[in-house]
């Protein structure tokens, strides 16, 4: 005995246009989410980091 499984699109179950459109996009894109890598802060080599920290401390003293 063979069973026939019929696919139902999840987006067809929603009546809210915004939700329906979001599920249609997800179905069209095969559920792949857009991934944005987290920003990476600057890396300081040698004395550049110490120099930057010194400058921040000096600016904080000037503002006080």
Image (cartoon, rainbow, N blue to C red):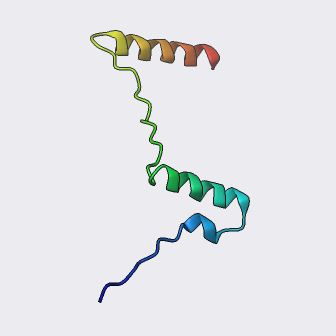
Q: Quadrant of residue 19?
A: bottom right
In the displayed orientation, state which residue is furthest to the right: 16
Q: Quadrant of residue 4?
A: bottom left
The total number of labels drawn is: 0
Q: Position of residue 44 (x, y in %)?
A: 33, 16
Vertical order, 40 against 17 (above or below): above
Q: Position of residue 14 (x, y in %)?
A: 66, 68
Q: Which residue sits at x=48%, y=49%? A: 29
In the displayed orientation, state which residue is furthest to the left: 46
- Taking 49 as reference, is 55 left or right? right
Query: In the picture, which quadrant includes the C terminus?
Result: top right
Vertical order, 64 against 7 (above or below): above
Q: Which residue sits at x=54%, y=66%? A: 9
9 or 53: which is nearer to us?
Answer: 9
Query: In the picture, which quadrant includes the N terminus?
Result: bottom left
Q: Position of residue 6 (x, y in %)?
A: 46, 75
In the displayed orientation, state which residue is furthest to the front: 1
- Taking 52 as reference, is 26 left or right? right
């Amino acid at each position: 005995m063979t069973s026939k499984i019929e696919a139902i699109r999840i987006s067809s179950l929603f009546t809210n246009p915004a939700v329906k459109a979001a599920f249609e996009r997800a179905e069209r894109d095969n559920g792949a989410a857009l991934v944005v890598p987290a920003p990476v802060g600057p890396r300081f080599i040698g004395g550049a980091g110490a120099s930057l920290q010194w400058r921040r401390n000096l600016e904080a003293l000037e503002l006080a």
